[in-house]
Amino acid sequence: MKHIEIIVPCYNEQECIAKLYIEVNKVFSQLSGYSFSLLYINDGSSDDTLVEIQKLASDYGDDKIRYISFARNFGKEAAIYAGFENCQGDYVALMDADLQHPPALLPDMIAKLEEGHDCCGARRVSRNGEPIIRSFFSRGFYRIINKVTSMKLVPGGSDYRIMTKQMADAIVSLSERERFIKGIMSWVGFDTVWIEYKNVERFAGNSKWSFWGLARYAWHGFVSFATTPLRAAIWLGICLVSATVVYAVILLKNTLSGVRAWEDTTTILLLLMLIGGVIITLLGVIGEYMARIYLELKGRPIYIAKASNIGKMVK
Ligand code: UDP
Ligand code: MG
C-alpha cells in the first residue's frame, strides 16, 4: 500500500475544508492500493478555517488529517514550504483548498508516477471564467520568463502536482527565503509530465489574488530566477560606447572633407556620450558581481542527484 500526502495551503477557506476532504476521500475509496492523508496548512486565516480543520481531525483522526497553523498570514509560498518540509508518504501532492484543482484527476496523475515519471502536473487548457486581461498578461509572463531565465515554465501549468517524496525533499533543499514554487519545481529537474484539465470555478469564497497582487507575484518570480536586468547594463554601455566611436569617426570624416566644421559642442557631445557609456558599462560589471552574490546568497544546492549507488543524493 502506497501512501500519498496532499499538502493544502488554506487562507480563509472555511467552506472548502470539509468539502475537499469529502471529494478526495471519494476518489481514494475507488482507488485500491493507495492510502492518503491531508496536510492542511492554515496560513493565518481570520475565519473558522482552523476550527474546521480541527473538527475534521477529531472526526477522522490525526493521521488522516494533519495540520500546521501559522501565527499570521505568511503567504501561499510559505505555506507550501511548510507543507513540503513536514510531509510524509511515498508520493506528495500539492492542491488548492478551493477545489479548483479537481481531486478527480488524482488517479490519472498517480498512474503517471507509476509509469516511472517523477512528477505529474495539471495544466489548465481553458481559462473560462477568468478575466481576459489576466489571461493576456499571464501568457506574456510565461513567454518572457522562459526566454530570459533557465526555467522552463509550461503555460497554464498550475501548482497542482503530485511527485515522489524524493522530489519533494529536493524542493525543500532549496532553502531560499524569497520563494517562487513554480520556478523551484522546474529548477530541481526531475521528469515532469502534464495532464490537461478545464478551468473550474472555486467552490466557495473569493480568490486571494488581485490584479496587482498577481503582477507583483509575476515580478517576484522573474527576479527570483532572472539576473538578466543586472547584467543587461553591460550590453547597453558597450552599445553606447560603440555608437560614440562610430559617430566620432563620421564627424571627423565630415570635418576633414570640409563638409562641416568641428565645433566645441561636438567635442562636448562626444565626451558626454563616451562618459555615459563607460559609466553604464561599469554599472553592468557591478551588476554581474551582484548577480553572483545574489545567486550565492540563495545557497541553492550545487546539484541534485536522482540515483546513486554511493548514497549521496543532494549537494
Ligand atoms: N492561499 C494561502 N495563502 C495566501 C493566499 C492563498 O495559503 O496568502 C491559498 C488559498 O487558500 C488557496 C490557494 O492558496 O488554497 C490558491 O489561492 P486562490 O484560490 O485565492 O488563488 P487563485 O486560484 O485565484 O489563483
Ligand atoms: Mg483558487
Image (spheres, rainbow, N blue to C red):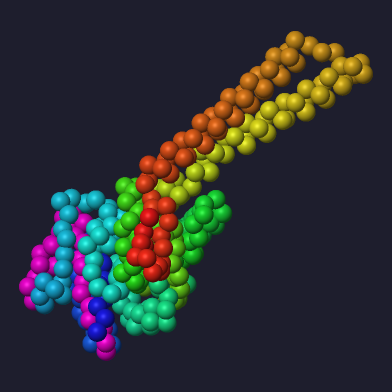
Q: Is residue 141 left or right of residue 305?
A: right
Does residue 112 appear in the picture of this structure? no
Query: From this viewpoint, which residue is outermost toward the right?
Result: 257
Q: Quadrant of residue 131?
A: bottom left
Instruction: Tell me residue 173's x, y (percent).
Output: 33, 56
Instruction: Tell me residue 239's x, y (percent).
Output: 68, 33
Q: Is residue 51 left or right of residue 24?
A: left
Instruction: Tell me residue 243's x, y (percent).
Output: 72, 30
Q: Is residue 214 left or right of residue 98?
A: right
Query: From this viewpoint, which residue is outermost toward the top?
Result: 264
The reply to whether the magenta stretch includes residue 53 is: yes
Instruction: Tell me residue 106's x, y (percent).
Output: 33, 79
Q: Is residue 241 above or below residue 255?
A: below
Q: Residue shown at 49%/64% (left/top)?
A: 155
Q: Quadrant of residue 54?
A: bottom left
Q: Residue shown at 42%/48% (left/top)?
A: 224
Q: Residue shown at 42%/79% (left/top)?
A: 116
Q: What is the quadrant of the C terminus in the image? A: bottom left
Q: Is residue 169 above or below residue 299?
A: below
The reply to whether the magenta stretch includes residue 85 is: no
Q: Which residues are magenta?
A: 32-59
Q: How many marks?
A: 0
Q: Is residue 38 left or right of residue 255?
A: left
Q: Nearer the viewer, residue 255 or 12?
A: 255
Q: Is residue 285 above or below residue 10?
A: above
Query: From this viewpoint, which residue is outermost toward the left?
Result: 58
Query: From this viewpoint, which residue is outermost toward the front?
Result: 310
